[in-house]
Amino acid sequence: MARLGIVKEGNGETRVAATPDTVAKLLLLGYEVVVERGAGAESSFPDSQYKTAGAIVADKKKTWASEIVMKVNAPTDAEIASMAPGTTVIGVMAPGLRPELLAAMA
């Protein structure tokens, strides 16, 4: 099955797109889960909890190379530029606030 990346949020965001419990469930569904180093720190989920759940903890580049990326907020322009064509992003997009986002991700 596909590799799913859980990336670290920026701009003071304290939420993370998946908890260690969620990671364990995704692994049971057959996903390979990669968590960006420090992604859960602002939510009180240290990297060690993600490792215990079975995730691979990796750097930003490896996490963003996943076929599916989970994040709380819409990706930034720099994050979009780093994605491979065909990457699926799961997160809050709010296209009405930033209509150019959908065009950039198409």
Image (tube, rainbow, N blue to C red):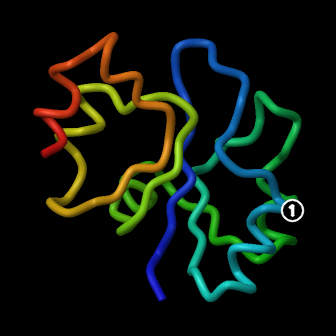
Q: Is residue 37 left or right of residue 3?
A: right
Quadrant of the rendered image containing residue 94: top left
Quadrant of the rendered image containing residue 48: bottom right
* Residue 5 locus on image (x, y percent): 51, 60
Q: Which residue is mark 1?
A: 21
Q: Is residue 10 left or right of residue 86?
A: right
- Residue pictured at 69% horizontal, 74% vertical: 26
Q: Of the residues shown, which amino acid type is indicated by label 1?
A: Asp
Q: Is residue 51 left or right of residue 104?
A: right
Q: Quadrant of the C terminus?
A: top left
- Residue pictured at 13% horizontal, 34% vertical: 104
Between 106 and 12, the one nearer to me in the picture: 106
* Residue 61 locus on image (x, y percent): 36, 54
* Residue 62 locus on image (x, y percent): 40, 62
Compared with 66, 18 (above or below) is above
- Residue pictured at 82% horizontal, 32% vertical: 43
**In the structure shown, which secondary structural element does the residue marked by tag 1 occupy?**
helix
* Residue 59 locus on image (x, y percent): 49, 54
